[in-house]
Amino acid sequence: MDQILEIKGLRKYFPIAEGGFFKTAWVKAVDNISFSVQKGQTFALVGESGCGKTTTARIILLLDNPTAGIVLFCGKNIFGLNPGEIRQYRSSVQAVFQDPYSSLSPRLRVGAIISEPLRANRKHLTKAAIQEKVNEVLLQVGLDPEMATLFPHEFSGGQRQRIAIARSLVQQPSLIVLDEPVSALDISMQAQIMNLLKELQDRLKLSYLLIAHNLATVRYMSHAIGIMYLGKLVEKGASEAVFAKRLHPYTQALFSAALPTHPDLVQESPYMLGEVPSALNPPPGCRFHPRCSSAKPICSRVEPELKMIAPGHEVACLLC
């Protein structure tokens, strides 16, 4: 299957001055990760807060520059694009953010919010053509085109997220970055929005990069999954394979800490010990070893690399 997005050796270090004029420490938010998103599929990045998921998304959206590594979109390195190509890339790669209350301007009507990308990037379109496109995407997300005259505060949270999705669709993108797209909504609305996203993916052949921590959302929506811990990918593979056989101790702990799918289901206790170390001074060797109940002395000395355990299933653990 063709890849629409490929990440190779991506790193993002943030400098922090420690006192001396020439002395600088580095927060290693993203540290040498690689993965790909297949056309028409969803790749999910999963992990605790601060693991580097959103930083990765910001780099892909050209909101941050990487320290090292490349991002290939349809085979082209996005950091080598000229201004015209960057404009086209921004149209092809859109985003839906977590909070529908802050991602929409309260001063603009819905029609203006959705049409703004068209007015900025497709100046040849007539007013009637823009209005027709706005009506089309509102219908696609299940809203009445007459709602285009209203302000965001006149909608519920679920409706606002539908508006945010409509705005992302108006330029006919091929890839959408979904940064916690349902975590700010109530449970019933989460199901509706996830179903809408899956329906749009099937109908429009969209690809998604899903940033999430809710494993139920990830299991329902994703085709492949990458587990991140302290800036590193520790496990990667097809969603079915990872959910069926969790190999890395961190993956096992993450899944055991999730809420059960049924009240009578007995969950194993989490395997994690202590707190997440600082990305400013990550532990040597395996970054998870201070919290791993199965750690061996070698884990504190040797940094594991991702290795293939089964076809399409990789894990970075010296004990696997």
Image (spheres, rainbow, N blue to C red):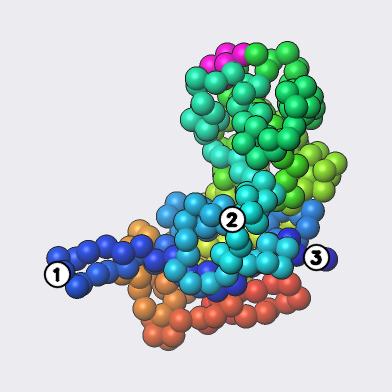
- Asked if residue 188 is positioned above or below residue 245 in the image, the reply reads above
**Location of residue 187 in the rendering, given as x and y in whole percent from the top left corner:** 62, 31
Q: Is residue 63 left or right of residue 94?
A: left
Residue positioned 27% across, 62% down in the render: 16
SS assignment at label 2? helix
Q: Dot 2: few (<14), some (14–19), or many (≥20) neighbours within 10 Å?
A: few
Query: Which mark, residue 174?
Result: none
Task: Name the residue nearer the viewer: 238 or 272.
Answer: 238
Is 95 placed above or below 70 here?
A: above
Check disc 2 and report the residue beneath it.
83
Query: Disc 1 marks which amino acid?
Result: Gly
| Depth check, front residue: 130 or 152 | 130
- From the image, state whether disc 3 or disc 2 is nearer to you: 2
At label 1, counting other C-alpha atoms closer than 10 Å, the crowd grade (few under 14, some 14-19, many 20 or more) is few
The first of marks 2 and 1 along the sequence is: 1
Q: Is 175 situated left or right of 184 in this image?
A: right
Q: Secondary structure at mark 3?
A: loop
Magenta highlight: main SS? helix
- Residue visible at 39% across and 85% down? 301
Give the magenta part as a residue range: 150-154
**Residue where numbered disc 3 is placed:** 2
Identify whether 114 is placed above or below 201: above
- Numbered badge on residue 20: 1
Q: Are the residues flagged by discs 2 and 1 in contact, CB closer than 8 Å?
A: no
